Amino acid sequence: MSAMTAVVQAEGLTKYYGRRRGLEDLTLEIQPGEVFGYLGPNGAGKTTTIRLLLDVIRPTRGLVRVLGEDTRTPAVRNRIGYLPGELALEGREKAREYLEFLAKVRGGVPAARIDGLAERLDADLGVPMRKLSKGNKQKIGLIQAFMHEPEFLILDEPTSGLDPLVQQEFLAMVREVRASGRTVLMSSHVLAEVEHVSDRVGIVRGGRLVAVENVAALREKAVRRVELHFDAPVPREAFEGLPGVRDLRIEGASLRCTIDGRPDALVKAAAKFTVVHMVSAEPDLEEIFLTYYSEAS
Amino acid sequence: MIVRTLREYRRALVGWAVGISAFLAMYVGVYASIRESPETYSQAAVAKYPGALRDLMGGLEDFTTGTGYLQSVVYQLFVPMMFVFAALTVANRAIAQPEEAGTLELTVTLPVDRRRLVLDRFAGLVLGLLAAAAVTFLVTYGVAQTIEMGVPFDRLLAAHTGVLLLALFFGTVALAVGAAVGRRAPASAVVGGWAVAGYVVVTIGRNVDAIAWLKWVSPWHYYLEGKPLSTGWPWGDYLVLAAATAVLLLTAVLSFDRRDVGV
């Protein structure tokens, strides 16, 4: 697998369900080693895109290639791990038996790896699948997606139903996948769920991809609140008119403001005084995300 | 995949096989007392099923001989119809039921060709029905031997093979409809409608000129016409059933390969 081949290549990818629009004119490339967050409200076209990548449904028009291959090639699906958005696990069969079946069809997975994943996610494999709760089904779904160490993981709403501790473990698993040079596409309707692991995010709305942003760039653009505390009162003039500094408020020895973009100028100005304490809130990417929404609608 | 298919079919198959076996053991066993007093029973039968109803039961001729009794009571309607509905239940589990439940989505994303998936599901249907047919055949033969019914092994085997082929045909109808539309209700409606109407056409409808020609599209015609219990293997008729099944399988494979799953 050449490092130059895009993991996902979509050109003008369009899907109509009868006359209802599922996805329109999607052009997107995802590169090897990238974690791509695919964002949008329910019904925006995320699941449609994902199902097209897996050949569960067929495009109305447009081109799509995955891992350099036609999606119709069954063998390419062996290199993909997939977690469906609406995972259905039913029957009297135990989760372990189902996983063993899936592993076999995918050419074999060491039992120790299944056990290891089950332990990490705190999943019970000895329970009949119809008795599993939604969160526990989701864990089984994650195990089967990760267990054969695929080159490309496609995860549709992976965190839904997971409790916060398991979510953290899941995000650690995604980071490990990225560290090993493999690729992840994960969808969500909440940016906060994917922003910490994604390199890029795509925002889809009403069947159209309205923005693709680098998360680092988004973070740089983001507005963040900063508080500085000094050992003595500071003059307002020292901070007035600094690039990117807004809503400046100085009360004695403390300074509060919001920063648009890089905090560089503020940090350099503050360095002339003695800083005893500094608070910088995480940038609220959700706000930027919502800005895109309002632009798109 | 075939092994897994069989496991998914297992419960339905075992249930139907046990049910049909019980039916067979009971009704074939009853023949012992019918043989004791043939006059009473043949008159009773004729009285109980007058006119058209008798046609529907295949004429009830020769009700008191071993062959005639088996034909009328076992192979005319009840056992093949039960097998047809067993095949329908099982075939619906191939594609339509998992698609409605949502479990098919993950299955089609496995590195397995869609065409192969349908063929494996069909293979599971064949093996499952074969097993059910083998069990019920042994029960029938065993009881028939015990009460000395005087029906030769190969005739009984020929008749039972007909049941298997008929069930396989309707099972494949259900598979093909399920493969094309992914829902159980249409598959059940097509099989139920075709099986019942097809049976009426070759029994009562035989004497109605306007619909008599419809027998050519009734699988029952090819199942019943050869009278395997009295004349042995009707190869031509069975070949028609098998060939029709093969054509249906092909349409199932092609339609499932072309369509969207689960939308």
Image: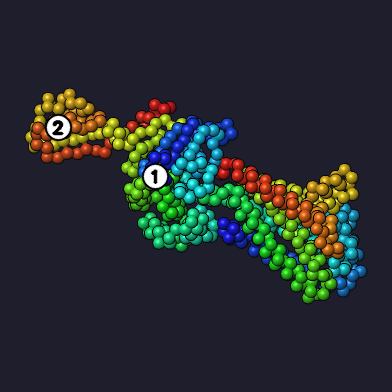
Other-residue count near label 2 (Cα within 10 Å), few / some / many at <14 / 14–19 / ≥20: few
| Residue drawn at the location 60% of the way across and 48% of the way down | B115
Q: Quadrant of the N terminus of chain A?
A: top left
Give the structural element (helix, strand or loop) at label 1: strand
All told, the count of numbered labels is 2
Callout 1: chain: A
| Residue drawn at the location 30% of the way across and 36% of the way down | A216
Percent x, y of residue B43: 91, 65
Q: Residue A183 bears which disc, if any? A: 1
Q: Quadrant of the C terminus of chain A?
A: top left
Percent x, y of residue A231: 8, 37
The residue beneath circle 2 is A268
| Residue drawn at the location 60% of the way across and 44% of the way down | B257
Specify whether A19 is left or right of A256: right
A171 w.r.t. B86: above or below: above
Q: Are marks 1 and 2 on the same chain?
A: yes
Give amino acid for label 1. Answer: Thr
Task: Decide if residue A255 is in sight here.
Answer: no
- Which quadrant of the view contains residue B210? top right
Cα–Cα gap, marks 1 and 2: 39 Å
- From the viewer's side, name the closer residue of B162 and A91: B162
Q: Residue A243 bears which disc, if any? A: none
Percent x, y of residue A157: 43, 44
Give amino acid for label 2. Answer: Lys
A196 w.r.t. A287: above or below: below
Contact between marks 1 and 2 (CB within 8 A): the answer is no
A229 w.r.t. B25: above or below: above
Q: Which is more foreground, mark 1 or mark 2?
A: 1
Specify whether A238 is left or right of A152: left
Other-residue count near label 1 (Cα within 10 Å), few / some / many at <14 / 14–19 / ≥20: many
Task: Decide if residue A7 is in sight here.
Answer: yes
